[in-house]
Amino acid sequence: MNTFNLKTFLTSNLDIDKKEILSIVDNCTIKKVKKNEFLLQKNEHCKHTFFIEKGLLRQYSIDEKGKEHILSFAAENWFVTDRESAYFNRPSTYYIQALEESQVAMIDKNFIQLLSEKIPSFTDFNNKLLHNHILHLQKRINLLLSAAAEDRYLQFVKMYPDILLRVPQTMIASYLGITPESLSRVRKELAHKNFKG
């Protein structure tokens, strides 16, 4: 499995001197996380955005009936955080948990501020990341409200092509907002279509 470190991510997306970025990234804590370990739990205050260098995380909530609802998966080269908690100083309603042994860069507000001061182009880049995240959430909401289970699944495959074999079917069903039985039926129907085609 590849490891994408934060320095490589930033230097490949920003026109910046590698020595300069190294001095900034040295201020960022890198944390090794065991499988099933939590980086955030409900009612805690989220103080970081997590950049996944290696491994796989999920962000989810649990409703009053004890049912899990997966908001997102985050694999290598992805970011995950609870923005409401981190930026509005509210107790989190989410859990962020490692599904595999993982390595994450812990990005806090001071790190973002330092990058913005040292690298003017970072602000535009950060805004693009944020707008892309909002776009993804809008599409996801629309799919959950109006799309058939098959369309939701196909979008999931497109969005997370390398995650299908890394998470159990029950978690994929939770992300899609359908039952595991419905997901199994969708997969069988698609396999049948592809076989006939």
Image (tube, rainbow, N blue to C red):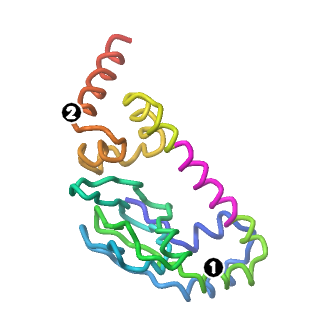
The image shows a total of numbered marks equal to: 2
Q: Residue at x 72, y 79 (%)?
A: 116
Q: Amino acid at mark 2?
A: Glu
Q: Report the predominant secondary structure element of the magenta stretch.
A: helix
Q: Residue at x 39, y 47 (%)?
A: 162
Contact check, label 1 and label 2, Cβ < 8 Å:
no
Return the residue found at the far right. 120
* Numbered range of the magenta stretch: 126-139
Mark drawn on residue 171: none
Q: Secondary structure at mark 2?
A: helix
Q: Residue at x 52, y 39 (%)?
A: 142
Give the percent coordinates (x, y) of residue 12: 65, 64
Task: Please name whichever residue, 100 or 137, is drawn nearer the observer in this view of the structure.
Answer: 137
Q: Quadrant of residue 123?
A: bottom right
Task: Please name whichever residue, 49 or 93, is drawn nearer the observer in this view of the structure.
Answer: 93
Say if 144 sits above or below 49 in the image. Answer: above
Mark drawn on residue 112: 1
Give the percent coordinates (x, y) of residue 144: 44, 39
Q: Amino acid at mark 1?
A: Ile
Quarter in which the N terminus is drawn: bottom left
Residue 53 belongs to magenta span: no
Q: Secondary structure at mark 1?
A: helix
Q: Is residue 69 left or right of residue 109?
A: left
Task: Please name whichever residue, 182 or 1, is drawn nearer the observer in this view of the structure.
Answer: 182
Quarter in which the C terminus is drawn: top left
Say if 3 sits above or below 156 in the image. Answer: below
Crowding at dot 2, Cα within 10 Å, few <14 / some 14-19 / many 20+, comes out as: few
Crowding at dot 1, Cα within 10 Å, few <14 / some 14-19 / many 20+, comes out as: some
Give the percent coordinates (x, y) of residue 56: 36, 61
Pointer 2: what residue?
181
Closer to the N terminus: mark 1 or mark 2?
A: 1
Give the percent coordinates (x, y) of residue 171: 28, 49
